[in-house]
């Protein structure tokens, strides 16, 4: 597993995760599949970027989460090939 631990004030946030599979070796159904968890909640299960938008195309997933321990925990779990994230936006809704 891989991921990020981001120090952040307690509150409610919108997390936008940006995905795009730009590597031709994983552009195909089932060639890159992974799970994504925020704050110990699995929000994407067997996520396959290519199956949703194809190759070289943006796919943005938006989640609302509440932080209560001063740390945003993001975990990627490998299913097939390595997980991929191109960008993460964290926007405060309330703190």
Image (cartoon, rainbow, N blue to C red):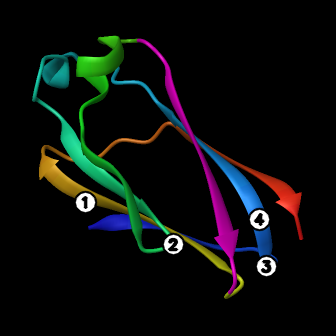
Report the magenta stretch's main SS.
strand
Which residue corresponds to mark 4?
12
Q: What is the CA distance from the residue labelled 3 to the residue labelled 2?
A: 12 Å
For residue 19, what is the image quadrant?
top left
Q: Position of residue 90 (x, y in %)?
A: 72, 52
Q: Residue furthest right?
A: 95
User: Would you say the residues marked 3 and 1 are in contact, meaning their CB atoms lie under 8 Å apart?
Assistant: no
As drawn, 82 above or below 18: below
Instruction: State the mark number for residue 77.
Output: 1
**C-alpha gap between disc 3 and disc 1:** 25 Å
Camera-side mark, 3 or 1: 3
The answer to whether the residue labelled 3 contacts the one labelled 4, judged by CB atoms less than 8 Å apart, is no
Ranked by sequence position, the earlier of labels 3 and 2 is 3
Is residue 64 on the magenta stretch? Answer: yes
Give the mark nearer the N terminus: 3 vs 1: 3
Find the distance from the CA under tag 1 to the CA under tag 2.
Answer: 14 Å
Position of 56 compared to 28: left or right?
Answer: right
Q: Position of residue 16 (x, y in %)?
A: 62, 42
| Image coordinates for residue 13, horizontal then vertical, percent | 74, 58
Which residue is under mark 2? 39
Residue 23 at least partly seen: no
Q: Please give the range of residues in magenta.
A: 57-68
Q: Is residue 74 magenta?
A: no
Which residue is painted at 42% across and 67% down in the image? 41
Measure the C-alpha gap from mark 2 to mark 4.
Answer: 12 Å
The residue that label 3 is drawn on is 10
Whether residue 1 is visible, yes or no, is yes
Asked if 20 appears above or below 15 in the picture, the reply is above
Label 4 CA crowd tier, 10 Å (few <14, some 14–19, many 20+): some
45 vs 4: above or below: above
Judged from the image, the secondary structure of the residue bearing numbered disc 2 is loop
């Amino acid at each position: 597993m891989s991921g990020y631990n981001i120090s952040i004030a307690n509150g409610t946030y919108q997390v936008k995760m940006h995905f795009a599979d730009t590597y031709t070796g994983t552009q195909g159904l089932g060639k890159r599949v992974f799970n994504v968890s925020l704050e110990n909640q699995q929000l994407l299960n067997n996520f396959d970027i290519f199956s949703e938008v194809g190759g070289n195309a943006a796919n943005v997933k938006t989640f609302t989460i509440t932080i209560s321990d001063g740390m945003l925990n993001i975990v990627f779990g490998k299913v097939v090939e390595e997980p991929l994230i191109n960008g993460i936006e964290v926007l405060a809704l309330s703190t």
